[in-house]
Structures are given as structure tokens and as C-alpha cells.
Image: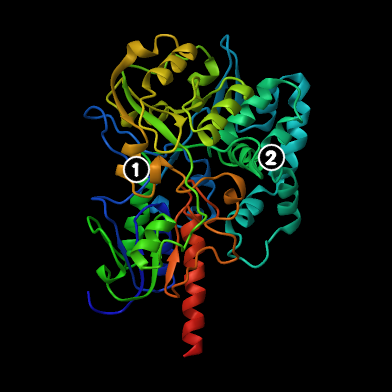
Amino acid sequence: MSTLLDAVVVGAGPNGLTAAVELARRGLSVAVFEAASEVGGGSRTEELTLPGFHHDPCAAAHPLGIASPAFRALPLARYGLRWLHADLPMAHPLPGGDAVVLARSIGETAASLGARDAGTYRRLVSPLLRHWDAVLRDFMALPSTALPRNPLALARFGLAGLPPAHVLLARFREDRAKAMLAGLVGHVIAPLSGPATSAVGLLFALAAHSRGWPVAAGGSGAITGALAAYLEDLGGTVETGFEVRRLDDLPPARAYLFDTSPHALARIAGLGARAYPNYRYGASVFKLDYALDGPVPWASEAARRAGTVQLGPGSRDISRALVDVSRRGVPPADPFLITVQPSLVDPARAPEGKHVFWAYGHVPHGWEGDLTDAIERKIERFAPGFRDLILARATAGPPQLAARNPNYVGGDIACGAASGLQLLLRPRPTLHPYATRHPAVFLCSSATPPGPGVHGMSGHNAARAVWRALRARDAAQ
């Protein structure tokens, strides 16, 4: 390939593919290069345990995927992407078989919190939900747009979301409400005392109320598969099994976009070790994928109907586990778990009568231990008889996660700690987070705003930055 391309993208994860699609839609020539043998990054589907059991090695439920302004603007359904919803987006079981639920209905969710907190939840969430699509679009597009389209609604969300999560939890009287919201914050492995962690909890709650927490039919690989197929129809190309060690490995292009960690970009582009001197990588997860002989036997009826199940159980348990892994650097004795049951709504993911099940607990950065027993003991507490259903399991701790995906430095699936100021200011404090010191090199991974998750918005925003840069370059010539 000797002709000058408009853009080359390194990395075929959700953000890299979205960036490539956005540029190709504008008529630019685009090529994507991926080191792995298939596209997907953190959005893939594989037979990890037994033949016929289709697992998601990383992301499985997609509240931000179905709500993503980037994905919603693309004809991905034409390329096979379908969203499947469980009866309940999320359940948070409590001891004794009871559960808090995060339902599509605010009323049903509020009722599960108890009479003392139902009204508080309604008053908090209902005003934000009225303009949620506009708020989410503005929130996820900043700072790539000069001004939000709905500044008043965004300001309302900001006032509620900028304080630490423990301020949000203090609004509620019973721990069942606090536990559910603490668990939502725990999805980004951030201590509850960090700035803007209230926004994380509200983001996930509002996502459930607005569009749900679905899985992709066939597995998470359907998302990136649809993006890659659309890109090829637009004239773009994707080459897998192509490891990039330096810019000279790539064909000549007017712009290079990296769906990689900041430090991998700096190494490949020759920017030096000091390009991102203060960028931090965070805690990791220990992940288990199960082939089961039947559905998980939850004691809670609500958990048996939920696509995602959080296992705390209490807010103090969750807070302690998050502090252990993020600040103390030790594995929690009682881990907070996030679990997903894809075959509940997508039976084709497993042989008839069988199920796939996805679970992880948080562990310190780079931890090399085994959390399997602690995870299974916790699941067994809320689903007696669970271990009797296990046909096979696949385990992945930080070393295995990092080996699978180089963006997961030390097993950090967020490609950088989503805590402290770095939750908002990624990869460094600047109004131009996608640009680098090299005028033709840009970062488009989840190390840039709006951060982790399978939503493609980091790639979307970076593509806009590249488009503006190329137009300005053309105008100056």
C-alpha cells in the first residue's frame, strides 16, 4: 500500500473501529491495523470453556452501548447488531432472598428501595431522566464540542454528579439503596470518596431507565463485527495479525489514530517516556467464565430475571473492597462481584438447556493470585447449589487479561485508573485530549474522554478532532 491514506487506525477495538467508520463516512480513505488475529479488543466473543458455549472475554452487558450517540447514529442493525433485554436490567440481592432492583421503571426501582427512600430516589432521578438523551450526548461528547446543546440539563446532572459518591449515598436512609448505588460506582473500580463518582452511579442508573442494560445477540463480538463490516462497506480496510512497533511499520497517512494505551502510543510514535508522565493505571479484575448445566439458582427471584447481578451485599462491604484494591493494594477478603447471565435472554449462546455465566471481582493492579474460591463462595451464598452446576470454567487474572489485550496494562480493563481527577481529565489536563505533540498522531482509546466502556464515543470524538485538524491543514495550504 504505497498511496497516501487520509487516516490509519492502530487497534480494532470499539473505539478504533468507530473512529475509522466516522472518518470513512466523511469520504476519507482509512485503514485499520490490529495485532490480534481478530477484531474486537474488549468486545469479543469466544468459546473459552467447552464447544458450543460462547463467552465474552471482557465486556458483556452494554448500558452505554445501546445508549451511545455514536452507535445510535450508525446503521449497525443492518450488519447484524441486535440488543436483547432481560426482564430486569440489574438486581442486587440481599441476605435472605430479598433484592434491590434497577428496573426500566423508576417506580419499580424506587419501590424496591423501601418506603423511606423511594421518594428520594424519584426526586433525584426523574428530573434528570426527562432530558437524558441530550445530557448523555453532551456529557459523552465533551470536550470535543465547544458548547453543550442542552447546558441547563447538563448543569443539573453536573450538580448531582460532581460530588463524591458517599455524598450521594448520604441522601438515603436505608443501606439497601446505598448498596445498589455503591455497586453502580464499583463498575469503574473507583473508591466512593473520589470526585465525580456520584456521576458514575447516576450514569448507570439513568442508562437502565432510559434504554436498559442489554447484551448483544450472539455476544459482544457482534458490536465490533458490525462496525468492521460497515467500515468495509464504506471502503475502509482492516488488517489483523499486524503488530505495530513504530510508525514506520505503517503505510504513509495524513493522520494516525491509536486505540491503545497512552504509553504504547508514545513508544510507537517516538514521543518519549515523558509524553504522559502522570498517567496512572488502576486496579484490575479476576474474571471467571462458566459453562453451567442450568441457570444460576439464585435465592432471589429478582436475580433470576436480571441480566446483570451485583453481589455486595452492603455499601460498607463494597466500599471496603474498592479501597482494598485501589488504595491498599490488597485483594479483598470479601470481593464485590459483578455478574452477567447472557444466555438468560440469548439461549443460542449455549447448548440447549445449558448456560453461560460471567463474573468478576476486583483485585489490585498486576495481582498474580487466584480469587476463584472467594468468588465462588460468594456466589454460593446467594445462589445455593451454584457449584454443582459448573461444567467448566475459564479464569483470567491481571496477567492473563494483559496478555490478551495490551491496552489492559497490569490488567486494568479501563485502560487507566477511572478515579481521582483522571476520571474526568484523561489522559492529561487539557482541552485537546485526543491530540499529541506529534501533529499527525492522535489517541482514540478509552484513555480519552468519556473513558471506559463499549460505547465508541472516545473514537467518535477523536475522529472529529482529526477531521477538524485535516480541514485546518488543507485550508492553510
Q: Quadrant of residue 169?
A: top right
Kindly identify which residue carries mark 2: 164
- Circle 1 — which element? helix
Left or right? Give the position of 195 relative to 443. right
Residue 304: percent from left, percent from top: 48, 19
Residue 473: percent from left, percent from top: 48, 83
For the N terminus, the quadrant is bottom left
Q: Is residue 423 above or below residue 21?
A: above
- The answer for how far apart the CA atoms under marks 2 and 1 are is 30 Å
Q: 216 or 146: nearer the eye? A: 146
Q: Quadrant of residue 209?
A: top right
Mark seen at residue 66? none
Residue sitting at x 47%, y 45%: 414
Which color scheme does this rendered protein use? rainbow
Q: Is residue 27 above or below residue 258?
A: below
Upstream in the sequence, badge 2 or badge 1? 2
Any part of residue 79 in sight = no
Residue 257: percent from left, percent from top: 40, 65
Q: Is residue 467 above or below residue 410?
A: below
Residue sitting at x 59%, y 41%: 207
- Circle 2 — which element? loop
Kindly identify which residue carries mark 1: 402
Q: Quadrant of residue 121?
A: top right
* Amino acid at dot 1: Ala
**Other residues around mark 2 within 10 Å, as few (<14) / some (14–19) / many (≥20):** many
Q: Is residue 327 above or below residue 26?
A: above
Left or right? Give the position of 54 relative to 324. left
* Amino acid at dot 2: Pro
Q: Are marks 2 and 1 in contact (CB under 8 Å)?
A: no
Q: How many marks?
A: 2
**Other residues around mark 1 within 10 Å, as few (<14) / some (14–19) / many (≥20):** some
Residue 38: percent from left, percent from top: 26, 50
